[in-house]
Image (tube, grey):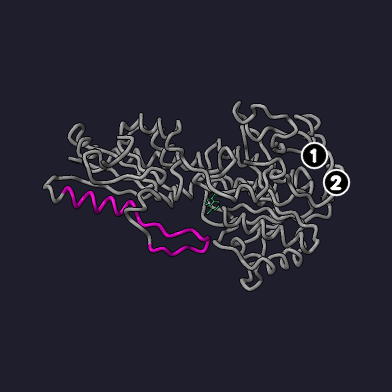
């Protein structure tokens, strides 16, 4: 159970400055200031609220512009770092942070740090880029990150030394769970040294597996792009006798992209996700179900999230530099194992295996994700300018909010096998609720 104190956002100190002209004019004319006591309920179900008094309920701070700020914009240096794998919307977030800091808050200097946290280790020699409204004006039309990225954290003390040397007052970390854990460690070291540096995160996960947050940026774009791969696989399958289109989609531990793409394309016969174990064998196993689809229609499409069926195709146990476990390749496993069974039974089949991961990760954000990234970047800047730190921005119950970094890095959200999302996938595919005997 979340306690009210779990949602407290650390701050660097009292806000001694008025928000500058443009921020003030915009806030006055369009929607007004947000005051620090504007909060929403963390839980919104009747069951969670039953019998509770308002003062005891956990509340989340609303994001948005404050009348008073901690940093003097004329003497503030901001820095942006992007970490980990590509995700649609990274350039939109960078652009939004630059526009908001430079144009709205009139911040004097914004640096783009190159290649993730390597930028904060002088041993790599990466020089920062000065980012201006002009230099970022068109970057949202492109996928990837103009700053470059890298995996893994650097020594925390070395990174804080670099922030001090580069005179950085605010660090924006656009990165995944490992990078946000790094951001939290930087914040704690800054606090320990009594420095005045704010560290604000924009959580990045294409898998949409954020705890306590409605949706991660890039996810909608990713499953739109994934739909094209699924539809392509279905066309390939239809064009061949006993054609099987097999698409591996992202989702190391959470099958949200696989479910989204399955529902949107509504062509998949079988969807496999990490949260729901399955067997190939047995009357209700994947292989017999596939054969039934082939005899009924002459073709079939399978979507497998990359983390599905790890009990069947274990990885090598090693981890990458972000600490992610190597997965066994479920796509290749299914291709080989289904192929072997068809061959053994003398059944002719045509399996096309598609792995669109890198194509999906590198596409530009869709219009909706672009707007989302714009708002996330702006919310991060509003928060940082008030001296808030050790936090990330996101939406909860559709509102933009501040959440402590320690809370969102505590775990990952998963598809509930008994929930409405998986239920509609089962309804759409008509696959057995449990694969296997
Ligand atoms: O190994 C993890 C993990 C994997 C995904 N440990 C903690 C949390 C976690 N997630 C969820 C997650 C993904 C991206 C971000 Cl930015 C955050 Cl904060 C959490």
Q: Do the residues labelled 2 and 1 touch (CB within 8 Å)?
A: yes
Q: Determine whether, in the image, residue 401 is placed left or right of residue 278.
A: right
Question: Label 2 belongs to which residue?
Answer: 15
Dot 1 beta carbon under 8 Å from ligand 1:
no
**Residue drawn at (29%, 38%) of the image:** 235
Compare marks 2 and 1 and give the one earlier in the sequence: 2
**Residue drawn at (63%, 47%) of the image:** 407
Q: Where is residue 136 in the image (x, y as percent from the top left)?
A: 64, 50
Q: Marks 2 and 1, Cα distance to the nearest angstrom?
A: 10 Å
Q: Position of residue 188 (x, y in %)?
A: 72, 59
Q: Can residue 409 be seen in this view?
A: yes
Residue 47 lies, with reference to residue 359, above or below; the image says above
Q: How crowded is mark 1: few (under 14 residues within 10 Å), some or many (20 or more)?
A: many
Q: Is residue 239 visible?
A: no
Q: Is 334 part of what is drawn in magenta?
A: yes
Q: How many marks?
A: 2
**Residue nearest the viewer, comparing 391 with 105:** 391
SS at badge 2: loop
**Residue nearest the viewer, comparing 210 with 375:** 210
| Residue at the limit of the structure toward the left, as seen here | 346
Question: Label 1 belongs to which residue?
Answer: 66
Q: Is 433 part of what is drawn in magenta?
A: no
Q: Determine whether, in the image, residue 299 is placed left or right of residue 375.
A: left
Residue 196 lies, with reference to residue 246, above or below; the image says below
Q: Quick one: quadrant of the C terminus? A: top left
The dot on residue 116 is none
Q: Where is residue 157 in the image (x, y as percent from the top left)?
A: 69, 68
**Residue nearest the viewer, comparing 329 with 108:** 329
| Residue at the limit of the structure toward the front, as seen here | 51
Span shown in magenta: 316-342
| Residue at the limit of the structure toward the bottom, as seen here | 123
SS at badge 1: loop
């Amino acid at each position: 159970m979340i306690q009210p104190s779990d949602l407290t956002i650390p701050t660097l100190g009292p806000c001694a400055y008025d928000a500058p002209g443009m921020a003030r004019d915009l806030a006055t004319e369009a929607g007004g200031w947000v005051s620090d006591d504007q909060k929403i309920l963390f839980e919104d179900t009747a069951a969670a609220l039953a019998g509770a008094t308002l003062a005891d309920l956990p509340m989340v701070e609303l994001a948005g512009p404050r009348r008073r700020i901690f940093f003097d914009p004329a003497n503030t240096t901001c820095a942006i770092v992007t970490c980990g794998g590509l995700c649609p919307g990274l350039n939109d977030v960078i652009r939004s942070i630059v526009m908001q800091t430079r144009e709205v808050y009139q911040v004097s200097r914004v640096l783009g740090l190159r290649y993730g946290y390597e930028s904060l280790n002088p041993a790599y020699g990466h020089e920062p880029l000065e980012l201006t409204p002009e230099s970022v004006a068109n970057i949202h039309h492109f996928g990837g990150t103009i700053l470059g990225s890298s995996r893994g954290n650097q020594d925390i003390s070395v990174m804080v030394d670099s922030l001090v040397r580069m005179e950085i007052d605010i660090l924006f970390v656009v990165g995944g769970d490992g990078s946000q854990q790094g951001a939290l460690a930087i914040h704690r070291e800054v606090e320990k040294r009594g420095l005045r540096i704010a560290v604000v995160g924009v959580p990045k996960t294409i898998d949409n597996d954020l705890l306590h947050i409605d949706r991660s940026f890039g996810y909608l774009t990713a499953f739109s792009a994934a739909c094209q791969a699924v539809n392509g696989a279905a066309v390939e399958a239809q064009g061949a006798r006993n054609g099987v289109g097999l698409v591996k989609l992202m989702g190391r531990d959470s099958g949200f992209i696989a479910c989204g793409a399955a529902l949107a394309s509504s062509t998949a016969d079988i969807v496999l996700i990490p949260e729901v174990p399955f067997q190939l064998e047995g009357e209700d196993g994947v292989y017999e179900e596939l054969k039934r689809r082939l005899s009924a229609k002459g073709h079939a499409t399978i979507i497998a999230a990359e983390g599905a069926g790890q009990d069947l195709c274990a990885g090598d146990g090693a981890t990458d530099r972000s600490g992610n476990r190597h997965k066994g390749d479920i796509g290749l496993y299914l291709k080989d194992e289904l192929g072997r069974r068809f061959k053994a039974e003398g059944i002719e089949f045509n399996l096309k295996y598609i792995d669109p991961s890198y194509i999906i990760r590198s596409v530009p954000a869709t219009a909706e994700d672009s707007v989302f990234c714009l708002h996330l970047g702006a919310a991060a800047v509003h928060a940082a300018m008030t001296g808030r730190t050790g936090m990330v921005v996101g939406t909860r119950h559709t509102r933009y909010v501040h959440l402590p970094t320690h809370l969102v890095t505590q775990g990952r959200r998963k598809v509930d096998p008994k929930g409405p999302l998986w239920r509609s996938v089962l309804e759409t595919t008509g696959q057995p609720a449990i694969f296997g005997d």
